Image (cartoon, rainbow, N blue to C red):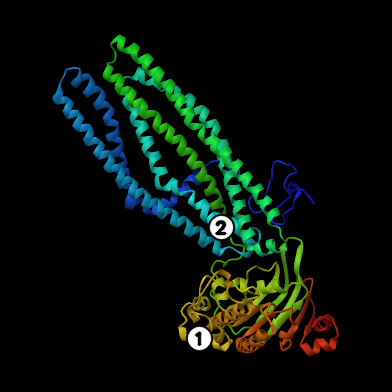
Amino acid sequence: MSTHSEKFNPKLGKKPQNDPNQSRFVYKDDDEIDKAFNWKQFGRLFSYMRPYARQMLPLIILMTILGTVTKLAVPYLTGVLAIDKAIKNSDLTLLYIVTGTVLGLYVVQWAANVFRIRYTNIIGQRVIYDIRSSLFSHIQKLSFNFFDKRPAGSVLVRVTNDVNSLQDLFTNGAVNAMIDCVQLAGIIVILLLINWKLGLAVMITVPIMFFISTKLRQKIRMAWQDVRLKNSRINSHLNEAIQGIRVTQAYTQEKENMKFFNGMNAESRKSWDRASTMNQAFGPMIEITGGVGSMILFWYGTYLIQQGEVTVGLLVTFANYVGNFWDPINRLGQMYNQLLVAMASSERIFEFLDEEPSVGDKPGAAALPKIEGRVKLEKVVFEYEPGRQALKGIDIEANAGQSIALVGHTGSGKSTIINLLSRFYDVTEGSVKIDGVDVRDVKLESLRAQIGIVLQDTFIFSGTIRENIRFGRLDATDEEIEAVTKAVKAHEFIMSLPGGYDTEVEERGSALSMGQRQLLSFARALLADPRILILDEATASIDTETELKIQEALKVLLQGRTSFIVAHRLSTIRHADKIIVLDHGEIKEQGTHAELIRHGGIYNGLVEAQFRFL
């Protein structure tokens, strides 16, 4: 058996490197993002705040300025007035006035901060709501080929983790950065006004600190991008592992799966440790720089006192301002790190938002009017990947109300034809027409509203039986729902459930049998009342007794509709108006069941093979 480092997972883009101490898991859908930090993207991110700017931003800015001014006034009052005048001259009245003023300023500062924090949190949460809604709305519009290239967990992490990582930035980070910038500017002006020599001496360390810190920024940005990438891979694998838990347990691969997960988990931990270590380098750097600045302050300040250029109170005022000077620089350094984390996530979010659907409405596309159901595929060629044809010049014509069966071995092109009819993909060459209109020339919503699909693996949503059936037409009444369930022979088993139509079912309908889920999907399709109905292996996993019910349901479901039926179980399609036999993307035979049996070709061989194994 191969070692874990040599293990190949088919969901990965390539094998991990042959390093026994490391595991490199590279997903095709999660390429490394290596883009320079740019203010254009920063502006795009903050454009989500624009709708709320007029409502709350002026008040927040006012409270920010008020809180900053009151904070900057305190060192001057305590140093110049309290020490140099009140204490030096033993003026208790002045000392009481200064003390009361300082207490009043602290109360104003507290009130301003409470107001600011409250409303910045409100704006921040609304912005996060808008970003998440925008992302989810856009993802729902993307075409199938987008999801073909990405694991579900990778998509999930963009909507959850990456959006969540922006919360701190929008709720307090941006405003705190504005406060710190205003505070820094105010302190610099005050220091230079009080004594420009001492002010310049103290700030001599700032350019040095800034130069050193900028060297870390690129590394920190890349480190946090790597953290997001590793977390995305873990989420992708978790989603796959949970979906495939039955297979994992059936083949007793829990230990191997755990080794695989531990490798990814270790890489995520190492990535976080690297980013966190770089993050933490900012704090000590600021503290050392602040310590050097304080040494310069007291050394040079003492000299100026001896020269009579400054007083003791003025030096205390300077010391307080310098203490307040390094704190915002430290916070801005942390804010920059927070911004890098947010930008790493925003790059991944915008990567999805910038993804254009490969299938969409043309400019000026008209709505498809109510159709009769005539379908024509003309010389259709389709490639999932360039150079690999799934369909090779297909010609199919169906009159309104006809049933067309598609049969053939796996990979022959049956499901591809179905996907093109619903316009989940666009043809590479040729055309698909409904009632003589090319499906690419009409609005997608109006097209799909008149096409119903019943799949082999019926998806049941979390909720009640009634809600799942109503998904076919949200304005349907309870009476209409009950009528369609009776028509497809589902009413009896629904009423046998504890809650009847109000029985709660879990995601994917795990508490229901395959046949029961399929009957619900038939009811859902009948309620939608489509003009074209697609049955994609809808009876493949049904027992014989349920199949008899479904055959009766099909008579109701197919009546007056154009239908395309994909089936491996040939007994379900023998009454189709036309049977088309596909092989490697080409039509090999077509005709009725009786005609194809008499012909003695591929279809006849398939029928004989099935009956031989019954």
Total marks in image: 2
Which residue appears farthest toward the top when viewing the image? 307
Which residue appears farthest toward the right when viewing the image? 600
Left or right of 480? Residue 558 is: right
Rendered view: 574 above or below 135:
below
Q: Nearer the viewer, residue 489 or 73?
A: 489
Left or right of 563? Residue 180 is: left
Query: Is residue 420 at least partly visible in the picture?
Result: yes
Q: Residue 397: image x %, image y %? A: 70, 82
Give the quarter of the image for residue 154. bottom right
Callout 1: helix, strand or loop?
A: helix
Residue 535 has which mark?
none
Residue 156 has which mark?
2
Q: Residue 114: image x %, image y %? A: 30, 45
Q: What crowding class fits label 1: few (fewer than 14 Cα within 10 Å), some (14-19), or many (20 or more)?
A: some
What amino acid type is highlighted by mark number 1? Glu
Residue for point 45% across, 22% down: 205
Q: Which residue corresponds to mark 1?
A: 482
Q: Residue 506: image x %, image y %? A: 54, 70
